[in-house]
Amino acid sequence: MNSKKLIFVGLVTLLFVISACNKSNGSSANGNGVKVTIFHDPSCGCCGLYSDYMKRNNFDVEVRQISNLAPIKEQYDVPNKMLSCHTSVVGDYFVEGHVPVEAIEKLLSEKPDIRGISLPGMPSASPGMPGRKAGPFIIYSIAKDGSTAEFMRI
């Protein structure tokens, strides 16, 4: 009986996560087949959900599962205060964390002279994350000198 309850609770939790992602992360944005490579740990479930989110928004997603992300974050020079659980590469830019497609589309359309953008941490209700949105998502730009500034709020 306990194993049946455990399976039931697991299934309910999975359905909740999927439902939360679909409700809070549904977007009319369109990646237009732009190639994005997402580097994440094979055991990270939210990174898989983020990859699915990007696919649903018409990005051409390549997933590279690696256990040690430190070399990727070092290669793209992602500042420590901007870190999250996965790093994506879109064109000449890195995208750190659970960044909504609206910010990626702004990045690609404006083509600023920066290294990348980040939504640090793993904010509740951001794409791929369950929960309720507690406030605006603040996406930061990372300049070539490593300084950061607000890129946009969603």
Image (cartoon, helix red, strand yellow):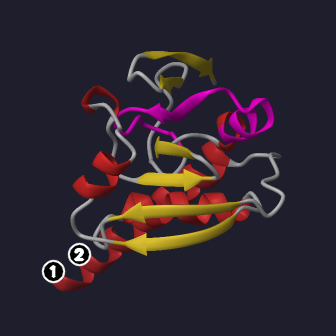
The kind of secondary structure element at disc 1 is helix
Q: Which mark is residue 91?
A: none
Question: Bounds of the magenta span?
Answer: 104-126
Instruction: Give me the residue at 61% from left, 40% from top.
Output: 100
Question: Please, is residue 51 above or below residue 115 in the view?
Answer: below
**Which part of the image, by quadrant, shows the N terminus?**
bottom left
| 107 falls in the magenta region | yes
Q: Which residue is mark 2?
A: 6
Visible in this render: residue 1? no
State yes or no: discs 2 and 1 in contact (Cβ < 8 Å). Answer: yes
Label 2 is placed on what type of residue?
Leu
The crowding category of the residue bearing disc 2, from other C-alpha atoms within 10 Å (few below 14, some 14 to 19, many at least 20), is few
Q: Which residue extends farthest left?
A: 2
Location of residue 135 in the rendering, given as x and y in whole percent from the top left corner: 50, 19
Image mark count: 2
Say which residue appears at 34% left-offset and 50% top-offset.
75
Where, by quadrant of the figure, is residue 66 drawn? bottom left
| Residue 2, numbered circle | 1
Question: Quick one: 110 or 139, which is closer to the camera?
Answer: 110
How busy is the neighbourhood of tag 1: few (under 14 within 10 Å), some, or many (20 plus)? few
Q: Nearer the viewer, residue 124 or 106?
A: 106
Amino acid, disc 1: Asn
**What residue is at 53 percent from the left and 54 percent from the top?**
89
Quadrant of the image containing the C terminus: top right
Given residues 65 and 13, the one toward you in this image is 65
Position of residue 96 measured from the top left corner of the image (x, y, whole percent) = 44, 42
